[in-house]
Structure formats: structure tokens, C-alpha cells
Amino acid sequence: MGRRKPMGGDPLSHLPHGPSFRFIDRILEYVPGERVVALKNVTFGEPYMPGHLPGSPSMPGAYLLEAMTQTAGILLSAGSPAYLARVRDVRAGRAVVPGDRLTIEANLLQGFGSLHRCEVKAMVDGNITCHAEIVLSAGSKQ
Amino acid sequence: MDPTKQKIRDILSVRLKLSTAVAKWGDDDPLFGPNGLGLDSIDALELVLGLQKEFGVTIEDQAMAVKVMASINTIAEFVHAHGKA
């Protein structure tokens, strides 16, 4: 097991995404090649909130999955693009709503060539709101 | 049929959803490549995980996978040598 340590510099620089398509705010914990914990403070100011859904705002499940995928992507080498290759065993819990402090934990289960299999959990107040196994492909689209 | 080979066929049928193709596939027929079952690298990972779960064998990298997962017979030989079949 690697040693836990805070990530230096701008942690989000590991992501190839521009600020307008980043679904995590900061990294809380980072063990290179093993584990990463990210934070997303979900607010009503998210551009999609007014439309999803009027009168009952919540984070779309697809965006939650994107946030989980971005978190897992932090585990891959900095600067190299990673592509979503497979998502399985998705289990969703309660909706993520404005005001939630969303914590996303990704653990690398296995590397196999360019493929990286991760277990990813999204939690609010310690309760799992979504769990999935995500496979990322580093450096090439499948 | 060798129960190990049947379990390998079950993995291919269920985990990789290839039941129709696998039923027609010979034990020596190639699984990958232009004359194979049309499997890609994600299928290879899925097969590795299935073999690990079913037989307790570890295939560490793609170079090893190419040799071990050439056919149902080569997988069975590997499992007989290293697994708990």
C-alpha cells in the first residue's frame, strides 16, 4: 500500500477537462495509483440545475457518473487523456441536491495494459448515493 | 466434456454474452484476432476477471494474456497448471 499524502500543486491539473466541464472541486486525499477522494460542493448555481428539474433540482445521474469518472481519472498519469471504456454494476441511491457535499472515492482495483478498473463510490454525509465499477482506457479510445 | 473447459465456455457465454458464438466454437479455435470471436481489450479484461474468480488464476499482463487466452484449450491448460479447477 502506498503512503497517504496530500496532492501538491493544482490537483485538478491531472484532468484534461476545461473548468466548464469539471465536476469535482478539489482533491481531499490522493495515493498515487491506488486511491483518490474528491469533493464536489453541489450548489443551485450549477448551470444545469434550473432545468433539472424545475422546482425539484438535483444533479443528473449522468453528471454524477461523469464526476465519478473524472475522479477515477485522477488515478491515471497526469496529463495523459483517459477515456471511459466500461461502466458496470451501477447502483444509485438518493438524489444529489443543491447543498450536498458530495464526496467521491475511487480505488484502483486492477490495471491491465492500458485499461484501469476502478471501484468508485459517491457519498453524501457518509451515505452512498452511487456506486459503480468504472474501466478507463489510458491514452486511446476503445 | 472436461469440466474446466465447460466452465471456460460458461464464462465466455455469460460474462461476455457470447453464448451463440461459443456454442459453435472449437476448443482450438482462436478467441482473439481476425479469425477469432471479435473480442476486444475490454473483453480480454472481463475474461481475465472471470478466470480469476472461477479458478483463482492470475493473468498479470497483456503479453501473458495473449499466450494464455489464445483458445479454450490454452486457457484450460493454464488453469490445470495454476488453478484450483
Image: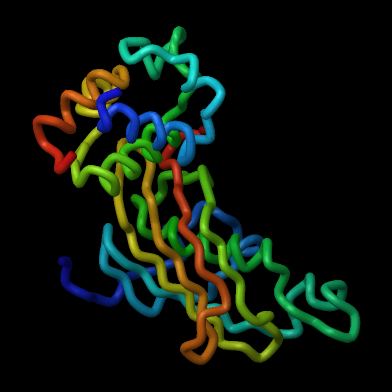
| Residue A99, above or below B46 | below
Furthest-front residue in this view: B1
Furthest-left residue in this view: B81
Where residue A118 sits, quadrant-wise, is: bottom left
Furthest-right residue in this view: A54
Residue A43: where, in percent of width, then height? Answer: 69, 84
Q: Residue at x 53, y 75 (%)?
A: A25
- Left-right relation of B42 to A108: right
Split into 4 quadrants, where in the image is the N terminus of chain B? top left
Residue A107: where, in percent of width, then height? Answer: 35, 64
Which color scheme does this rendered protein use?
rainbow
Of A28 and A86, the residue lying toward us? A86
- Left-right relation of A63 to A4: right
Split into 4 quadrants, where in the image is the C terminus of chain B? top left
Where residue B48 sits, quadrant-wise, is: top left
Q: Residue at x 17, y 24 (%)?
A: B77
Of B80 and B57, the residue lying toward us? B80
Q: Residue at x 51, y 75 (%)?
A: A122
Furthest-top residue in this view: B35
Q: Is residue A111 visible?
A: yes
Residue B81: where, in percent of width, then height? Answer: 9, 30
- Left-right relation of A50 to A100: right
| Residue A18, above or below A130 | above
| Residue A14, above or below A50 | above
Of A97 and B85, the residue lying toward us? B85
